[in-house]
Image (cartoon, rainbow, N blue to C red):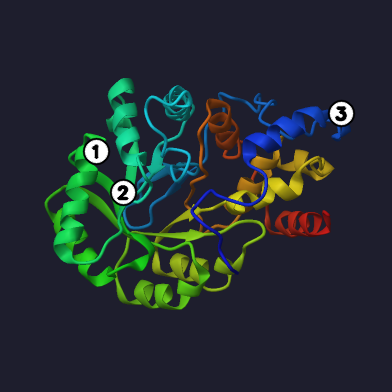
Amino acid sequence: MKKLGKAGQSGGMTRSQFLRLAAGAAGACAAGASLGPLSLAIAADAPVLRRPIPSSGEMLPVIGVGTAVVYEIETNDAKFPALVESIRTFLSNGGALIDTSPTYGRAEKNLGEIFRRTGQRDKFFLATKISTTGEQSGVNSVAASMRDMGTDRFDLLQVHNIRDTAVHLRTIRRLKDEGKVRYTGITTSFDNAYEEYERIMRREKLDFIQIDYALDNRNAEERILPLARDLGMAVLINLPFGRGRLFSKARSQPLPPFAADIDCTSWAQFFLKFLLANPAVTVVIPGTDRPEFAIDNLNAARGRIPDAKMRQQMIAYWDKLG
């Protein structure tokens, strides 16, 4: 499947645009089926689902935060306070994992500022990446990431888009031995890299992989996700909303009546619960730039998760939408 642009971008409708439209179309929805994060009362005090990192048994909340595109703004941007509150809300409602990269513009610098304002850096599971070529360039990149985010350690350090993988994995493992990194990983969001990605998975001992996966992009189900489960690797899911494609297609459409059977009250939860129903998935990392989105996303990790039969029903319903 061809991928478009940077993570989180799309020629279709953004989530914010979708939710504004959804609010106007609420009367057309089936009873109890909300299109936006307005129905936030799914047992807000209910625990967020957690899953183990296979290599250690450490438990992680299954919904994280991705920072591509939406966290690349300047700190004097009028939208920046919403980013601060999004991260604060995410943590206070049961979240933990934040995924970023030095290639995401100002995202790492902005996270550093958010951590300074909230004083909560140590409460997060922080994941970033090396996305460069050459050993010294990778070492310098990690040092810059630590400086920008005001930290001396990362919970997870990943080779971004399997670029110079062998070289950077040596660096990551050295940093792990020094106590500056806890877990190793690799990423991709392009299915034309899957063949090489699979070879690396088989060759290297990894704690995590990160892969693109969405209701309308299920290619990772064929080999990558089963292999990760067989090899005991945790799985992060990027692009869970398909770069905005899913919201664009779902506009003005009601949730199916059976959504109530999985405690689902928004399309975002529908899309996320579908992914969480795959037992290989450890954490899904949707872009989250507003507090209400943080709550809505986390509510996908509360209540019932689809079984195999329900997943097929979700696919069938989705495929029939115009």
- For label 2, the residue is 102
The disc labelled 3 sits on which kind of residue?
Answer: Gly
Residue 107 seen in render: yes
Q: Quadrant of residue 77?
A: top left
Residue 34 seen in render: no
- For label 1, the residue is 148
Compared to residue 186, the image places residue 237 above or below, namely above
Task: Give the label, 1 or 3, closer to the camera.
Answer: 1
In the picture as drawn, the residue positioned furthest to the left comes out as: 178
Compared to residue 135, the image places residue 120 above or below, namely above
x then y, percent, for residue 287: 51, 42
x then y, percent, for residue 298: 55, 35
Whether label 2 touches label 1, CB < 8 Å: yes
Could you tell me which quadrant the C terminus lies in? bottom right
Task: Using residue 169 as the reference point, say whether residue 46 is left or right of it.
Answer: right
The one of 136 and 265 positioned closer to us in this rendering: 136
Label 1's element?
helix
Q: Which residue is located at x 40 percent, y 36 percent? A: 96
Could you tell me which quadrant the N terminus lies in? bottom right
The disc labelled 2 sits on which kind of residue?
Answer: Pro
- For label 3, the residue is 27
Question: Quick one: label 1 or label 3, which is nearer the N terminus?
Answer: 3
The disc labelled 1 sits on which kind of residue?
Answer: Asp
The one of 210 and 84 positioned closer to us in this rendering: 84
Q: Which residue is located at x 61 percent, y 46 percent? A: 272
